[in-house]
Amino acid sequence: MKIAVCGKGGTGKSTVVALLSNEFKKGGMRVIVVDSDESNSGLYWMLGLDKQPNPLMDFVGGKKDVQGKMLARFSSGQSEPEMSILRRDDIHMEDIPADYMAEGDGKQLITIGKIKQSLEGCACPMGVLSREFLGKLRLSRDEIVFVDMEAGIEHFGRGLETSLDAVIAVVEPSLESINLAEKINDLASSAGANFAGVVLNKVGSVDTYKNLKKELDKRGLPLLGKIPFSEGIIDACLQGQPMESAYSGGEAFKITEKLQSILGLANR
């Protein structure tokens, strides 16, 4: 099962990815996290890992090499969602070299690529690699993938959702965030992806929760659950500490249970 976590920038996608990963790990699943956000740098410590792995982009020759292949394919009339970069038709976790994967405590992290310097150009090669890698990644019954997506909705134009089993939207207490979740639902559904629902994050009061729930209901957006505003999570983000040591609430577990039921994972 491959699940993308999407949303507006700053909503806490990485936090939600880390919290849900911890819960699935506790349930006996082998958790694989794919960092598809070219600007995020702290996901590894949120997961309790010691290091950031080398980016998968380097494994396939680097960004310039992939850009060259893309230009050649554009010239031949291919659109970006049709492009292929990887030689293998099927990829298993055992095929990925150790330097390109960080591992520990029942979790593994793979990074697609990062923007390293100014004037580097667009992130399109990372989107192409993400889509193809996820589409070709083959999982065993006890493996689950969470994809920490880039902020916004640009990745929908690259067809990445065609490589996924489900999409989650993370919403913070703002109208902009709710409106974007509605757009994510529309785009995921039109791409044939399963929109599993919304995770509310940074919910500070009962009234805030009620107002957010009302807005979701107006838009027909299903609710998976909420993560309350937490000083512990804020402190962990400031100090570079894992989410597992910062959060002990039961809300993430409830979201995991609901997600398992919706996606048919409970009886696997």
Image: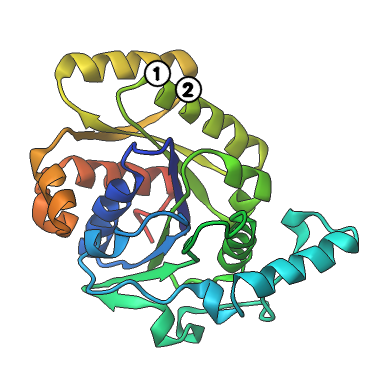
Q: Where is 217 relative to 228, above or below? A: above
Front residue (pair 121, 36): 121
Which quadrant holds the C terminus?
Answer: bottom left
Identify residue type, mark 2.
Asn
- Disc 2 crowd rating (10 Å Cα; few below 14, some 14-19, many 20+) is some
Disc assigned to residue 179:
2
Query: Contact, CB < 8 Å: mark 2 with mark 1?
Result: yes
Question: Residue 209: horizontal and vertical position, in percent?
Answer: 23, 20
Residue 134 figure quarter: bottom right
Residue 35 figure quarter: bottom left
Q: Where is 268 relative to 138, above or below? A: above
Helix, strand or loop at mark 1: helix
* 54 left or right of 15 in image: right
* 63 left or right of 261 in image: right
Q: Residue at x 15, y 50 (%)?
A: 238
Q: Residue furthest front?
A: 119
Question: Residue 58: horizontal and vertical position, in percent?
Answer: 53, 77
Q: Residue at x 61, y 69 (%)?
A: 63
Q: Residue at x 20, y 66 (%)?
A: 48
Disc assigned to residue 175:
1
Q: Where is 247 relative to 49, above or below? A: above
Identify residue type, mark 1.
Leu
